[in-house]
Image (tube, rainbow, N blue to C red):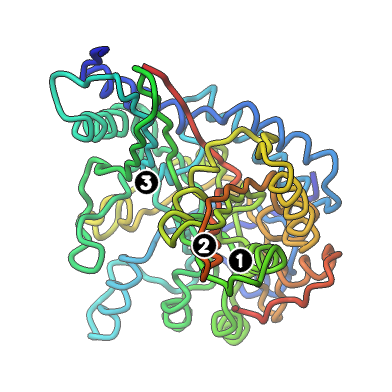
């Protein structure tokens, strides 16, 4: 059993929140830079240039990449031989969110009662925290400030079990097509296929923690990812939906075994400001 | 970089008439921020016949909820939010005199028609470039609904604020035109406003 102090978790989450808001991950910036070379629309190229310039300004002047510093989505892999001391894990994470958003001058975007008074909690806490028990004695924390514009374009549908691969492709394309500029393309698209309703959406979200270009180890799923990326980019949505050949930077698909009656498909969209940070304690 | 049309605010009828979809504009002068909660309040006040906290006639409204300013700075990151959420309020705002809007993403059929009818223009700033757009904001003052925090109405003094015309006063729609132009997919175009 290895002991990990709750205060260390708080400190780590606070740091990840600030870093994620200001520093675009290298793989994302690289993919955007690459897209600049292939984008067919001159207006699209100009938008990509502004996105790249924005990343530079954010980094140098410590200004958040985007004013929507998101819902704090935290994915925790808790080693079963790790023991959190001096506090409750979830409280420690929420304290880290509060500290990071406050000290980092990030926007608090969380309201308490979704259909009631909608009063801002003033701290951006609570986060949306997923925990997974894994082997080992470490705690891995993935932090994703998830913007509202893209999250609001998420969709779920259960298809007839025989609908197959074609249904997945059609559903993802339709989702991206009708979302237009709302989720801030070029996008990163997470797709969860199988499981149950909540499992499909959870794995779609978790897929967004992958680095650009990282393929699913299953060759069939990896092939589907390639097919989806091509199909989505053929839609012509383009950067900020002004028309163009770069609608998505990557598509990540995760699957889970499912019920004989079901083919659940969840699409969770990430914007070009695909902010994720990781730490292991 | 494509040529920018410099526009001194407030917007004039001539300036609006001259703008076409895909034009790059650089706004200088005063614009006001408003998001969901501020729209809801403004329209409720107007409907109740109460005086508004600002004169909307000829105004440009920017859909933005900035991050807090670090000490010594006027504002934080300040990029556009999704415009479609404001669609239910926009025809009424245009009736109240708004002539220009800056947001991101497309507008539904009712808003496009209202823009045409009121001879107004909808532009996008590039979503997710709030750090870059910060540099074009010289001064900020909260003018109404301070209790709304990031959603309060702010008066922004902007310099060469970059935007792209998406819906002009002639009924054009850049997002639809652009998607059609670059679409290589055999899939049918989605219905407008779908």
The answer, for residue B138, to whether it is visible in the render is yes
Label 2 close to label 1 by CB (< 8 Å):
yes
- Dividing the picture into quadrants, the one containing residue A166 is bottom right
Query: Does residue A261 sit above or below A28 in this rendering?
Result: below
Q: Chain of mark 1?
A: A
Under circle 3, the secondary element is strand
Asked whether A91 or B194 is in front, the reply is A91
Marks 2 and 1, the one that precedes in the sequence? 2
Residue corresponding to mark 1: A175
The answer, for residue B19, to whether it is visible in the render is no
Under circle 1, the secondary element is helix
Q: Nearer the viewer, mark 1 or mark 3?
A: 1
Marks 1 and 3, the one that precedes in the sequence? 3
Say which residue appears at 68% left-offset and 37% top-offset.
Answer: A215
Question: Residue A153 shows which numbered tag?
Answer: 2
Q: Residues within 10 Å of mark 3 (few under 14, many from 20)?
A: many
Specify the quadrant that holds the C terminus of chain B: bottom right
Under circle 2, the secondary element is loop
Say which residue appears at 34% left-offset and 17% top-offset.
Answer: A137
């Amino acid at each position: 059993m290895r002991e990990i102090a709750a205060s260390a978790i708080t400190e780590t989450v606070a740091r990840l929140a600030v870093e994620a808001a200001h520093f675009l991950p290298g793989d994302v910036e690289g993919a955007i830079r690459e897209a600049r070379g292939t984008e067919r629309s001159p207006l699209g190229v100009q938008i990509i240039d502004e996105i790249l310039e924005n990343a530079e300004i954010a980094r140098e002047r410590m200004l958040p990449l985007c004013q929507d510093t998101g819902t704090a989505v935290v994915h925790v892999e808790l080693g079963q031989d790790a023991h959190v001391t001096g506090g409750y894990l979830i409280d420690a994470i929420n304290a880290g969110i509060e500290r990071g958003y406050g000290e980092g001058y990030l926007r608090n975007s969380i309201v308490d009662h979704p259909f009631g008074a909608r009063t801002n909690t003033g701290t951006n806490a609570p986060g949306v925290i997923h925990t997974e028990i894994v082997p080992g004695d470490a705690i891995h924390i993935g932090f994703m400030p998830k913007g509202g514009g893209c999250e609001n374009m998420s969709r779920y549908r259960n298809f007839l079990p025989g609908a197959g691969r074609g249904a997945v492709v059609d559903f993802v394309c339709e989702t991206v097509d009708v979302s237009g500029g709302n989720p801030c393309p070029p996008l990163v698209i997470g797709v969860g296929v199988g499981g149950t309703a909540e499992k499909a959406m959870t794995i779609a979200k978790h897929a967004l923690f992958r680095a650009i270009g990282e393929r699913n180890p299953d060759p069939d799923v990896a092939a589907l990812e390639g097919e989806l990326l091509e199909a989505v980019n053929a839609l012509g949505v383009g950067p900020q939906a002004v028309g163009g050949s770069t609608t998505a930077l990557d598509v990540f698909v995760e699957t889970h075994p499912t019920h004989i009656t079901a083919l659940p498909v969840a699409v969770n969209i990430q914007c070009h400001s695909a902010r994720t940070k990781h730490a292991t304690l | 970089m494509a040529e920018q049309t410099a526009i001194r605010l407030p917007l004039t009828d001539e300036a609006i008439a001259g703008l076409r979809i895909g034009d790059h504009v650089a706004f200088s002068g005063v614009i006001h921020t408003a998001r969901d909660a501020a729209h809801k309040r403004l329209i409720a006040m107007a409907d109740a016949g109460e005086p508004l906290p600002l004169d909307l006639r000829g105004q440009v409204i920017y859909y933005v909820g900035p991050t807090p300013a670090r000490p010594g700075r006027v504002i934080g990151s300040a990029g556009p939010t999704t415009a479609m959420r404001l669609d239910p309020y926009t025809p009424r705002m245009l009736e109240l005199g708004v002539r220009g809007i800056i947001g991101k993403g497309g507008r539904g059929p009712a808003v496009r028609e209202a823009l045409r009818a009121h001879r107004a223009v909808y532009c996008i700033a590039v979503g997710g470039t709030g750090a870059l757009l910060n540099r074009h904001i010289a001064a900020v003052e909260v003018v109404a609904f301070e209790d709304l925090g990031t959603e309060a109405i702010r008066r922004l003094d902007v310099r060469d604020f970059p935007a792209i015309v998406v819906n002009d006063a002639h009924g054009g729609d850049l997002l639809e035109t652009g998607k059609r132009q670059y679409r290589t997919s055999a899939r049918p175009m989605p219905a407008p406003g779908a």
